[in-house]
Amino acid sequence: MIRNLAIIAHVDHGKTTLVDQMLRQAGAFRANQQVEERVMDSNPLERERGITILAKNTAVRWHGTKINIVDTPGHADFGGEVERILRMVDGVLILVDAAEGPMPQTRFVTRKALALGLKPIVAINKIDRADAEPLRVHDEVLGLFIDLEATHDQLDAPFLYTSSRAGTATADLAHPGIDLKPLFQAILDHVPEPKGDPAEPFQMLVSTLDFSNFIGRIAIGRIERGRVKVGDEVALLPLGEPGMVTDEPFERNRVTRLYTFDGLHRVEVDEVPAGDIVALSGFETIEIGKTFTAVEHTERLAGIAVEEPTISADFIVNNGPFAGRDGKYVTSRQLRDRLFKELERNVALRVEPTDSPDTHTVSGRGELHLGILMETMRREGYEFQVSRPRVITKLGPEGERLEPYEELTIDVPEDYMGVVMEKLGPRRSELTEMKNPGQGTVRLTFRIPARGLFGYRSEFLTDTRGMGMMHHRFLDYGPWAGPLAGRKRGVMVADREGTVVAYALGNLQERAQMFVAPGDLVYEGMIAGESSRPGDMDVNVTKEKKLTNMRASGSDENILLEPPREITLEYALEYIEEDELIEVTPKSIRLRKRVLQASDRKKAARAARVADAS
Ligand SMILES: Nc1nc2c(ncn2[C@@H]2O[C@H](COP(=O)(O)OP(=O)(O)OP(=O)(O)O)[C@@H](O)[C@H]2O)c(=O)[nH]1
Ligand SMILES: [Mg+2]
């Protein structure tokens, strides 16, 4: 007996923590096995950031039933993956934070799950939080279900109150949970058994991909019907309309390896019947949404639309003065090969060549999507530069220009509402909803062009002194909102190469927030800090104090320096302007002007003014 379940939620609502406890309580670990927290977040970037980036399969056994569990990412940039995963499960566990309630991503994934007719189980999670209000959140989830036109059956979903951290679930708040038994029982009772008949011809949809250098692309999905064995010759049909495929060519090959999931492992197996989730290899043309079938019965399943990217940035060979100092891979060929290799498994990503062999345009679902790729590459030893991201526009039915819009949700203490509204107005946002549950914080929902959000996060954090929370996700395409103002403040640009000196920073910091610290190396055209006023300024950050008889040079002991602003990749993507680049190396993230020499920049600015005036 099998149950296939996906766990879906907004970011941080406790999915991966719950999977830990499910594994533990179902006996997936040895008695004294040491297991790290959030064990499914296995890649280093996931561990560092505390978020799930890639969906992952696992499975546990409960009273003789195998429960396949897919842990999904909650961040909106990876939402498309969740949508695909829903095609390989028969039920969903919707987790909702007992204090935050349903958030934009909760709504998005719940809508998709309900529309596919999946049977939900709801877990109001983190009931151990001091500010938890499980009953209010219960009502909000029901409201969301009604709003999303859930069927009668779906509205009948069991509601559990859980703490992922403590590993407890209960259906009745008057009787606190002691373990996850009520959850396992709800899964057995409410998630339907997969339907497929193992006696019919083999059929399986590719729902997600994995990749191994050793065996190539790996397809993951649920076997719809029939069974598959290692060594079987099967068909992999091209994408297209569902139904019998008669006159299209397709790949015909032998299954070389088959795996099923068990706890933290993949188990190599010889044969798998309908209903189970498998990982399968041996085919050249594996792609999301393609159907595997028996060779003598080539019936295609409805495909899966892969989400379209919404932003692009150029990835450029590092041509700065420090190029090649840190990286192992720096040539345009190495950069190109790496980017194209990424397409093996990063299905929502696009890579296009440009007129210049040194530049490729990379398109993705958001800044985090591109930021994770950049971070992964620098850790592998790549060096490169990235341009300011731009939104991908489209043409509407009447040939009008459309741009992506986002839904932005902001939770802030009431006192900060004014400053939020004031800042978001000029960014062409529209307030769509305001909720004041009466505890001092308000929830504001906006519709805003994706462009309007560029650079806002850092302002928001400063304006609300870290007391606010903001989340956004792609909504739809809407009319081009017209020009938007860029960064309000100019930057301080280093005017020569050298080592940063505390004395120089001491003089500048009154008028700037520096990005560099004493001892850092800079070059002409590198951005050293943010000015407190509009307009860029060329500065000398290597300037030593004039020598006097009394003191040796470089004695900076009396200068109190503010710590430099930490530049992360996502921050940099939001921050830079069109005439700037991010230089990414294994050791540093630097911001620079595209045109390095101050004299050239002045000439270019003058030419632009002349062009504007004419
Ligand atoms: N108080 C409390 N905190 C919890 C609970 N469950 C998870 N957390 C905390 O919430 C944070 C996020 O937990 P995760 O399990 O990573 O959440 P997630 O839903 O997997 O997040 P993404 O995969 O990034 O969407 C962690 O700091 C957890 O320790 C809970 O039941 N109670
Ligand atoms: Mg997670």
Image: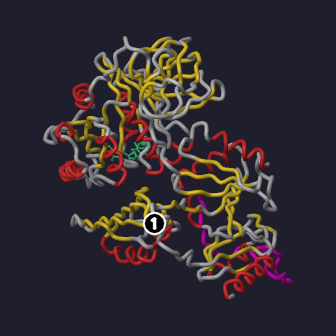
Return the residue at label 1.
Answer: 449
How packed mark 1 is, by other alpha carbons closer than 10 Å (few <14, some 14-19, many 20 or more), is many
Q: Is residue 560 magenta?
A: yes
Q: Secondary structure at mark 1?
A: strand
Residue 299 placement: quadrant:
top left
User: Residue shown at 52%/27% (left/top)?
Assistant: 237
Q: Which stretch did the figure color magenta?
A: 539-568
Q: Is residue 328 visible?
A: no
Give how far across and how far down residue 87 sits, in percent.
39, 34
User: Residue shown at 23%/33% (left/top)?
Assistant: 178
Which image quadrant shows ligand 1?
Answer: top left
- Residue 4 vs 522, above or below: the answer is above
- 261 vs 195, left or right, is right
Q: Is residue 514 magenta?
A: no
Q: Is residue 12 visible?
A: yes
Quarter of the image with the N terminus in it: top left
